[in-house]
Image: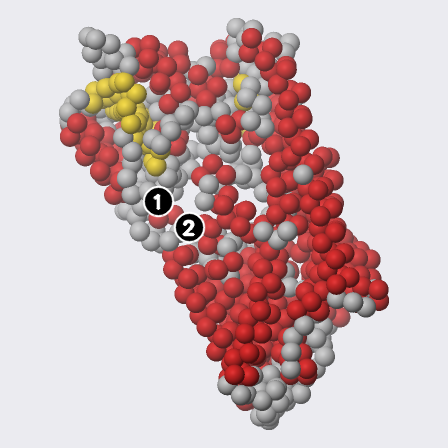
């Protein structure tokens, strides 16, 4: 989010001039701020209304690059030098107060409004937000398969501030380099354009090229990391440097302004979460923003300034920074407490509350600090005060994680008592006695603790491939006795892999050679998932090689498979739902090779965007409040039975009654936490299904 400096380079008059006059205040930039923050806020409140509203961040990036570069250029023109301490002091005075107050408020609110499952993550993100490394933390999480489904936290939006702060650290150094080059080339003071523009343009070009390449790889970190974003701020700098010396094209500025605004709005309406971003797509809002700024003030019929000059628009531009800071925590806290996204009316109330907090932040935090004489008297005062404040907030940021560990330790005593003497209806057995039964006895401990559930999984070691891996690993867990035993293969994505704990026990008990082929995010089918459609098919080739290995081995007696039923496949015009024909084709190929095929119906899916761990922790003593209707858990997306109809030799295994009752699907069954993340079943619960799974496999084989 850009700082709200009111000084900027002027775009000039109607006639060309060597040095266009400058206005001290640019209402069009304030209006762009207002538009940008509205796009982001609406997107966060109601993403269906503006599926591409996230481009508001790109608008802010361009504005920041433009204003900061213009400020530095004017100082160089006026004095022939650039004071780094004064520059960084101004940024600290402008950006830190409201940001640090927001972080502190979130840290304190965490204990009241957030489940303990979030405390550690919020603490880590508070620390990263304080020291402006949040974008790199989120980039690391986005490439971590198990972290990808984590629910939203109230400080995630600080990633864009981190990008800007990192820009502010190195951009003035680049300006000094350009000025030095200009002097070496003997360019007169105030005429550094030959050196400044090429240097800035080179940075923008390098970042843009890297951005387009890295985004095309499909790595989700591309959205957050600084190298894929710097070009947006750098182009704002190029524009500022160019407008300082020429405004020749401004005879058409009304058209330019309208075209720029149209480009931004088009991106907000047309783009969506499936758009590879930033990539080349980000050029649309970036160039649109540059066009509006370059056009400057326009007048007359169909002029943007009929809207731009309105007081509400200018006021919204003034408070845009604080509005950006405060709106997202409110949205996250609402989602957590209501266990659902806000509806239209709730969104309006959240918007009103956000505006109220933004106004308070602007008038009582931003403005007083910016105007404080003692801070502006010497550049090292705001820098020193900022460092001290960041240290204090950084210390506060450690508290949520520490409190979380203390809470888990306190619960561990009760949990150990439960494990030492488990009730007869522990875990899945509780479903036999009474549907939706959360606790099997007087002890209301939950195993695993929601805070530790993510660790409760089968230890595959290196025997799991991630989606972009070219090969699916083949691993054997050989428990055959001297007289031999069957070879059973577990094949598929992570939802197939979640059955490994139970199958491993069965393999030990029955003397199997259990062979695994687990490839996360890659259902065992030749058909492509929609997320692969924009680039290389990362799953189909390793899946084909896995099928060949299963057939060529010659010793595989049975294949057990399952898949994440929320996976979406490309429409292949087969007359069946996407994915059905390909899945059935693989099963038929295996059956032709003499392999028994046992597809397992997928486990129920929690509500999209809801993390069961958060809800259970928030309602630790009454987890039944987290149950969802059965028709939500089994939403009709699973194509297992439809595929089996095309592969009659496949024998479907269905344990749905061990996850849901007649009407609802609980998140805790017989004191056992069902999910270890947003949709994968815990190892502990799977271990309570061993007997039932063995019975179902035997019954299917006997058919």
Q: Estimate how packed mark 1 is, as few (under 14), some (14 to 19) or many (20 or more) residues with alpha carbons within 10 Å.
A: some
Image position, residue 561 (x, y; %): 31, 27
Q: CA distance from mark 2 to mark 1?
A: 9 Å
Rendered residue at 73%/35% (across/down):
112
Rendered residue at 64%/9% (across/down):
442
Image position, residue 690 (x, y; %): 40, 14
Image position, residue 506 (x, y; %): 34, 14
| Residue 446 visible, this orientation | yes
Q: How many marks?
A: 2
Residue matched to label 1: 468
Image position, residue 429 (x, y; %): 49, 11
Give residue 405's quadrant in the image.
top right
Residue matched to label 2: 219
Quadrant for the N terminus, please: bottom right
Q: Is residue 118 left or right of residue 228?
A: right
Q: Is residue 634 left or right of residue 383?
A: left
**Tag 2 near tag 1, CB within 8 Å:** yes
Examine the rendered structure and indicate whether residue 84 appears above or below residue 102: below
Rendered residue at 71%/50% (across/down):
390
């Amino acid at each position: 989010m850009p700082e709200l400096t009111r000084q900027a380079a002027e775009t000039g008059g109607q006639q060309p001039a060597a040095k266009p006059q400058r206005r001290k205040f640019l209402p069009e930039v304030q209006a762009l701020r207002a538009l940008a923050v509205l796009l982001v806020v609406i997107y966060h409140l109601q993403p269906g209304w503006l599926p591409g509203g996230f481009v508001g961040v790109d608008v802010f990036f361009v504005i920041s690059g433009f204003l900061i570069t213009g400020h530095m250029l004017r100082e160089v023109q006026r004095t022939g030098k650039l004071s780094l301490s004064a520059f960084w002091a101004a940024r600290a005075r402008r950006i830190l107060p409201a940001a640090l107050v927001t972080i502190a408020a979130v840290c304190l609110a965490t204990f009241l409004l957030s489940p303990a499952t979030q405390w550690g993550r919020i603490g880590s993100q508070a620390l990263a937000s304080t020291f402006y490394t949040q974008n790199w933390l989120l980039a690391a999480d986005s490439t971590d398969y198990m972290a990808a489904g984590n629910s939203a936290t109230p400080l995630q939006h600080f990633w864009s501030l981190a990008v800007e702060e990192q820009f502010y650290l190195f951009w003035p150094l680049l300006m000094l380099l350009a000025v030095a080059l200009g002097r070496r080339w003997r360019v007169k003071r105030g005429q550094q354009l030959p050196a400044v523009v090429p240097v800035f343009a080179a940075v923008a070009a390098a970042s843009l090229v890297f951005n387009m390449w890295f985004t095309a790889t499909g790595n989700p970190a591309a959205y957050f990391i600084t190298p894929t974003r710097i070009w947006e701020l750098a182009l704002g700098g190029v524009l500022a440097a160019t407008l300082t010396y020429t405004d020749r094209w401004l005879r058409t500025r009304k058209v330019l302004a309208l075209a720029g605004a149209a480009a931004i709005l088009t991106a907000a309406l047309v783009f969506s979460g499936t758009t590879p971003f930033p990539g080349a797509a980000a050029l649309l809002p970036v160039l649109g923003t540059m066009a509006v700024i370059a056009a400057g003030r326009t007048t007359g019929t169909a002029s943007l300034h009929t809207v731009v000059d309105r007081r509400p628009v200018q006021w919204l531009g003034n408070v845009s920074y604080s509005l950006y800071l405060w709106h997202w925590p409110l949205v996250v806290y609402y989602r957590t407490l209501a266990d659902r996204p806000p509806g239209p009316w709730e969104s309006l109330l959240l918007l009103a509350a956000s505006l109220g907090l933004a106004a308070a932040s602007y008038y009582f935090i931003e403005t007083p600090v910016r105007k404080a004489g003692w801070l502006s008297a010497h550049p090292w005062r705001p820098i020193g005060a900022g460092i001290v404040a960041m240290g204090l907030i950084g210390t506060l940021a450690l508290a949520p994680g520490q409190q979380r560990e203390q809470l888990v330790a306190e619960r561990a005593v009760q949990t150990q008592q439960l494990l030492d003497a488990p009730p007869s209806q522990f875990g899945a057995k509780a479903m036999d006695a009474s549907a939706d039964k959360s606790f099997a006895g007087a002890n209301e401990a939950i195993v695993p603790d929601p805070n530790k559930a993510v660790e409760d999984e089968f230890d595959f070691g290196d025997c799991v491939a991630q989606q972009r891996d070219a090969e699916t690993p083949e691993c054997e867990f050989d428990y055959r006795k001297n007289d031999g035993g069957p070879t059973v293969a577990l094949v598929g994505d992570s939802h197939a892999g979640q059955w490994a704990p139970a199958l491993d026990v069965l393999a030990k008990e029955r003397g199997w050679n259990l062979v695994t082929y687990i490839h996360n995010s890659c259902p065992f089918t030749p058909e492509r998932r929609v997320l692969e459609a924009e680039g290389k098919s990362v799953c189909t080739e390793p899946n084909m090689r896995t099928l060949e290995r299963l057939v060529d081995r010659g010793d595989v007696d049975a294949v057990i498979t399952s898949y994440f039923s929320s996976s979406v496949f490309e429409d292949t015009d087969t007359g069946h739902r996407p994915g059905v024909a390909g899945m059935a084709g693989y099963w038929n190929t295996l059956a032709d090779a003499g392999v028994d095929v046992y597809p397992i119906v997928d486990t129920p899916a929690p509500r999209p965007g809801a993390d069961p761990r958060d809800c259970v922790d928030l309602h630790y003593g009454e987890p039944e409040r987290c149950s969802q209707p059965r028709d939500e858990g089994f939403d009709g997306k699973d194509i297992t039975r439809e595929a089996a109809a095309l592969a009659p030799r496949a024998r479907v295994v269905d344990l749905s009654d061990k996850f849901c009752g007649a009407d609802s699907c609980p998140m805790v069954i017989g004191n056992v936490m069902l999910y270890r993340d947003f949709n994968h079943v815990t190892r502990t619960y799977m271990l309570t299904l061993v007997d039932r799974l063995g019975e179902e496999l035997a019954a299917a084989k006997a058919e």
